[in-house]
């Protein structure tokens, strides 16, 4: 098997929004989950990619096992997306399913989500509500957004 994989990991686990492990709702299972994760990550051929909001980094550092893994290397910091990346996140998926996006909607959403804490999650929720309000129109428009959401900060 080792020859077949040529030193590459056999298993890759991707944990998006790893900060959820540190929320009150996960408290009952947090320690068991982290222990399992650390045991698995120590296995040869197993790799973990976890995304984490920066404001949860102190909780990760406070956990001795997670801190040791981070200190072992392989930590990469990714900054918040800029306005162009946000615009692509808005328009790309819509276009992929045949929907047009009114430029005024993109501009408004980018202006509201850019550099906003939790902006990506708020943007996702706003886009879903906007789509529900205007999915039959073929074009996501600013008036759909205004009617359904009213503004990202209101979510």
Image (cartoon, rainbow, N blue to C red):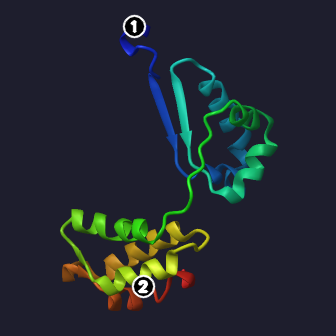
Q: What count of labels does the image hold?
A: 2
Q: Residue at x 80, y 35 (%)?
A: 64
Q: Residue at x 39, y 74 (%)?
A: 127
Specify whether 106 is left or right of 58: left
With respect to residue 19, does 128 lie above or below? Answer: below
- Residue 19 in percent (x, y) is at 64, 53
Task: Let me know if residue 23 appears in the view.
Answer: no
- Residue 119 in percent (x, y) is at 54, 71
Task: Locate residue 56: give its quadrant.
Answer: bottom right
Task: Let me know if residue 126 appears in the view.
Answer: yes
Q: Which residue is mark 2?
A: 108
Mark 1 → mark 2, Cα distance in angstroms: 53 Å
Q: Residue at x 48, y 67 (%)?
A: 82
Task: Locate residue 36: give its quadrant.
Answer: top right
With respect to residue 125, does 62 lie above or below? Answer: above
**Could you tell me which secondary element the residue under label 2 belongs to?**
helix
Callout 1: few (<14), some (14-19), or many (20+) C-alpha neighbours within 10 Å?
few
Residue 63, labelled with which disc? none
Specify whether 138 is left or right of 155: left
- Residue 89 in percent (x, y) is at 38, 65
Specify whether 125 is left or right of 89: right
Q: Which residue is mark 1?
A: 3
Q: Which image quarter holds the N terminus?
A: top left
């Amino acid at each position: 098997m080792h020859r077949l994989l040529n030193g590459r990991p056999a298993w890759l686990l991707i944990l998006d929004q790893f900060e959820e492990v540190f929320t009150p709702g996960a408290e009952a299972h947090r320690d068991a989950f982290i222990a399992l994760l650390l045991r698995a990550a120590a296995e040869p051929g197993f790799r973990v990619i976890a995304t984490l909001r920066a404001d949860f980094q102190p909780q990760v550092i406070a956990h001795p096992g997670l801190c040791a893994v981070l200190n072992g290397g392989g930590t990469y910091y990714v900054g918040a997306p800029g306005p162009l990346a946000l615009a692509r996140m808005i328009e790309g998926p819509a276009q992929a399913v045949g929907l047009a996006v009114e430029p005024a909607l993109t501009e408004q959403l980018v202006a509201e989500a850019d550099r906003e804490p939790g902006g990506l999650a708020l943007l996702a929720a706003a886009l879903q509500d906007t789509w529900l309000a205007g999915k039959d129109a073929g074009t996501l428009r600013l008036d759909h957004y205004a009617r359904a959401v009213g503004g990202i900060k209101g979510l």
